[in-house]
Image (spheres, helix red, strand yellow):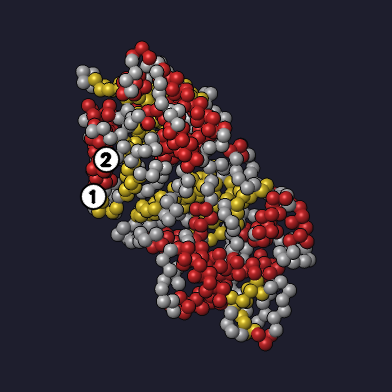
Amino acid sequence: MTASLTASVALPFEPEFIDEGNDCYNNVESCALYRMLPANAREYVKDSPHLLEYLHILPVNTVGIPLFLSELKRDLKSMENPNIIYPVNDTTFVHIFPDPNDVRNWYIPIEPSFLHSVKDFLPHVEQKLIDMIDAMEEEPVTEKARAEVLKKFISQVIYVKQPGEAIDESRLAGGTPKDLKARIKQFLNSDIGAKGKIQKHQAAVPQMADGRIILTQQEYKALEYLMVRDKIELGTLKPFLSDEYIEDITCDGVGPIFIEHKIFKGLKSVVGFQDSGELDKFVIKLAERIKKPLTYRNPIVDATLPDGSRINIVYGTEISKHGSNFTIRKVNEVPLSILQVIESGACDYMMAGYLWICLEYGMSMFVSGETASGKTTSLNALTTFLSPENKIVTIEDTPELTVPHKNWSREVAKGKGKGEGEGSDVTMFDLLKAALRQRPNQILVGEIRGIEGSVAFSAMQTGHPVMSTFHAASVEKLIQRLCGDPILIPKTYVDNLNLVIIQSAVKLPGGGTVRRMLSINELVGFDPETQGFSFLAAFVWDPVTDSFTFTGKGSSYLLENKIASMLGIPENKRAEMYNEVEKRAKILERLHKAGYTQFWDLFHMTTKIKKQGLLTIEV
């Protein structure tokens, strides 16, 4: 059996147990706590009894019954002391638990295995499974197939004791199974030490005469979940990776795992590591699971998880004084659409309408800003504005972009030094050169940071529009980086780049951090006499009102000189281009109100609109 990926759990409250004198887990409607729950919570606990078990140890008399929500709305951001439970998948829930003494509240994953000390049974179950797995003639290939095989084998080595069932002693190998309530009490009394720290505890393992281990239905579900989670999936990280509201998962060393939440911002998890040895074992196993082994010689790993999330692991205390650490940047399975970006306040309909015209007519664009400013999210959202008949090539060192077009080639750099040109098998530079031979209508580069930048600008010169992300906080800094080492773009080439979006994570006057497009800038040209660049801001964000101003209305270089000239519009009628921006802004607003907010839905609708000729610019 493969090694497990587990960490320790430390609850932020003293667990309590409400002894009601009956087995409410087998008959939830007889449970007094169940009857106190709101209707939606009752539905959850009927399908997931382990959630009711968790509520039984929660000090509800002190903290109150949590609010149960099926989805989280943005207006929850203003809640000071959130006490909320929401589902992340069919089996797992998350409790956002308030901490009045810290700016970070608690993040508590509630899994089927959370309150069951089935770890005592695991070595015995694993021993029985080894022979069964060794006897397999053909090993399953996919993760799903491996999980199904493991579940099948587990079912063969477990005897599930039904509620109220009395097992004849002649059928036992020794010992009698305790009922569920007795085991939970044993867990609370013996397995949770000071302030809720879960510790190892050895218990008797009751077995049938034929060797099957006797478990209750709840324990069986817990064990099956734990085995699949830790042996096939990513162990302790599963609930975090399943939560669509999480953006970043960080372990800085010994201590809790921290997360950045889309609604509740910075949170600390009850899951963490008690010592550096435990943490080292975890990151080594994690790296092996994703087929990127760590060694003392190569202690840093950059990789992609099966769900597409980006992970960085640093191993050992020699280069990380607080111990091994890892950071996971989650990606959405379905990218955000531009309408969802507008919902978040990052831009408005007029900006989207303007970018729609620019991108449709082949303008090259960079989305620039600091780390975690939402650059890749914005770039991905804007791909729905590219003509649906276009051929798109994406080039990335870590695959993050999802393009809705059918004619899409996805290229990913391969090798230890990917993106930098040294020690790599196939670099970003190699892929970009190859892409120029594929006759694409647009080239999307995940991030330009090295010598691939010069090839990108060569592509722009030959008429291949390029879209990419870039690390720079202003247009001036972006130009300095482009013209400096290692990119070294000649200054006369810079104006091949048409658009620069400057994006940032900013603090609003009322508090809270949000992502905003600070400006959309048009690069006009380079003056060899003054050695200066001219650019104008088409849109600017006003931090006081948290709104956007179309500062380029009436003076847009791209709309009037580039796109209008391309379309053969005479000079005296080029002001009509601004009416086209407003028309497209209204189309997006109507689509938004009609509910076409999802990435794929929006692309299909804009494709239909284009096919119907509604986007033709008439003068």
Q: Quadrant of the N terminus?
A: bottom left
206 in relation to 392, above or below = below
Would you say 536 lies left or right of 48 here? left
The secondary structure type at the circle numbered 2 is loop
Callout 1 amino acid: Glu
* Residue 189 visible here: no
- Count of labels in the image: 2
| Front of the two marks 2 and 1 | 2
Would you say 76 lies left or right of 356 here? right
Residue 607 x/y as whole percent: 44, 36
Whole-number angstrom distance, CA of label 2 to CA of label 1: 27 Å
| Crowd class of label 1 (few under 14; some 14 to 19; many from 20; radius 10 Å) | few
Residue 574 x/y as whole percent: 37, 16
* Residue receiving disc 2: 439
The structure residue drawn at horizontal position 72% and vertical position 79%, both measured from the top left corner, is 166
Would you say 57 lies left or right of 124 here? right
* Residue 466 visible here: yes
Callout 2 amino acid: Arg
| Crowd class of label 2 (few under 14; some 14 to 19; many from 20; radius 10 Å) | few
The structure residue drawn at horizontal position 53% and vertical position 72%, both measured from the top left corner, is 152
Residue 456 x/y as whole percent: 27, 37
Residue 134 x/y as whole percent: 43, 77
The structure residue drawn at horizontal position 64% and vertical position 47%, both measured from the top left corner, is 69
138 in relation to 455, above or below = below
The secondary structure type at the circle numbered 1 is loop
* Residue receiving disc 1: 422
Q: Are marks 2 and 1 in contact (CB under 8 Å)?
A: no
Give the quadrant of residue 91: bottom right
The structure residue drawn at horizontal position 71% and vertical position 71%, both measured from the top left corner, is 163
Would you say 511 lies left or right of 415 here? right
Viewer-side residue, 423 vs 552? 552
